[in-house]
Image (cartoon, rainbow, N blue to C red):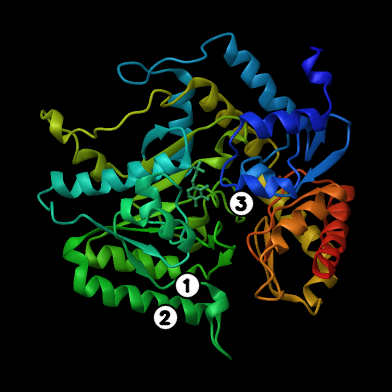
Amino acid sequence: MTEASQTSSAAWTARSLKSVWHPCTQMQHHETTPLLAVSRGKGAWLFDHEGRRYLDAISSWWVNLFGHANPRINLALKDQLDRLEHAMLAGFTHEPVVQLSEQLSARTGNTLGHCFYASDGASAVEIALKMSFHYWRNTGKPDKREFVCLRGSYHGETLGALSVTDVALFRDAYGPLLGKPHITDSPDARQAGEGETAADQARRAAAALEDLLNERAGSVAAVIVEPLVQCATGMAMHDPLYLVLLRDLCNRYDVHLIADEIAVGCGRTGTFFASEQAAIWPDFMLLSKGITGGYLPLSLVMTRQHIYDAFYSDEVSKAFLHSHSYTGNPLACRAALATLQIFEEDDVLNANHVLAGKITRAFGTLAEHPKVRNFRQCGMIWAFDAQVNDADTSFARRFFTIGLESGLLLRPIGNTVYVMPPYILDDNEVMHLANSVQTVFEKALMS
Ligand SMILES: *Cc1c(COP(=O)(O)O)cnc(C)c1O
């Protein structure tokens, strides 16, 4: 143990606030909202320097699938560390990136047989947008350069990704720097009217998109969607029918479909890819977050043969012009391979089905709470909207703070409380999760 690692949580927090600028944070809020110094993680738990533990109910921003310090992923990484930590991917290749590409392609029946790599989710979005535009340019349709996103979409925070993100706060702040997408209706099931089903809302949203494509398809390169759950803007869930209709519209109007499965992929919604629940494949499939089990930054864009072929030429300018220094990092790919192996060895999709049933039953009475609206679930995601006063802007931060006092790490999005746990909770952890969410919710309502 170094001297530094014995220092108290409070000391690390104070030093962090002086030197580290934390992401997506109004730093002044840390005058009242705690900053947690994590010293280690084990399974579903994070520990501070005093040994207090917190159940990581949001999988550390949705990335951790099989727990912290997972023995199988650790072992794979230690082995990879002694072989090859990194080599550039232009002009070179290596076992982990080949195996990962083959295994992921196989999971799409080789429909999406070509994998392009980057490090963060937002970069995968940039790649898909550029690739779509460049495909149309290479095939003699350079006018197809507009993009369509959904109301309430979130695709990341670099400028291209932010352009197709519909978050008012971001658009107000950075609007002058951004491209102007077409924003079409969301199939969000909460918008179904009295006596209507989620499928009715899906049909209405698809009809609105058809109107748009009718007019603009000649200028539109692609539609980008978060299949089944629009996560970051508040866990808006929709009927898989929307994806069926969307696939059909994209075919009929000759527009690419980009499925951003960065949050919903890797088993989060119950199938390995969310798109599987609509029995469709997009033209571009984006993965990141859970793909390395939450260990290392890695993202990728999977695409089809005919798209790949449109770049294959004796002209350099027809090649896809994009690269990052750490593209296809072997350690990250190896963590992803270990993650995929756990999916196979532990029959994770079936096991999650059982686990999800237990968690839903444990939440039982919460769904009936008078201040709970729209209790909803999709695979390993649960969410509800807390009915709080419109003027109450600090509910989320209160919930987070009270949660920590109860050993629960949970950060609501506005008034939406959601749980997105790692796939490894045991029965005690399920009970701790359900009980503490209920207790913390009630305290957060009262304070
Ligand atoms: C998190 C997220 C991104 C961005 O990924 P980063 O790694 O944070 O850049 C993009 N799309 C969706 C749907 C996400 O949830």
What is the x, y in percent for residue 437? 82, 59
Query: Residue 187 got which mark?
Result: 1
Mark 3 is on which residue type? Arg
Quadrant in the rendering for residue 223? bottom left
Q: Is residue 424 above or below residue 415?
A: above
Asked whether mark 2 and ligand 1 are closer than 8 Å, the reply comes as: no
Q: Quadrant of the N terminus?
A: top right
Q: Secondary structure at mark 2?
A: helix
Q: Is residue 101 above or below residue 57?
A: above
Q: Write down the residue under mark 3.
A: 268
Q: Secondary structure at mark 1?
A: loop
Would you say 137 lies left or right of 265 here?
left
Mark 1 is on which residue type? Pro
Write the residue at 35% across / 43% down: 126
Lower sequence index among marks 1 and 2: 1
Q: CA distance from mark 1 to mark 2?
A: 8 Å
Lower sequence index among marks 3 and 2: 2
Q: Is residue 432 above or below residue 187?
A: above
Write the residue at 72% across / 74% down: 388
Q: Quadrant of the C terminus?
A: bottom right
| Label 1: how many Cα within 10 Å (few below 14, some 14–19, many 20+) | many
Q: Is residue 180 above or below residue 299?
A: below
What is the x, y in percent for residue 197? 55, 82
Write the residue at 56% across / 58% down: 231
In this rendering, which labeled residue sits more in front, label 1 or label 3?
A: 1
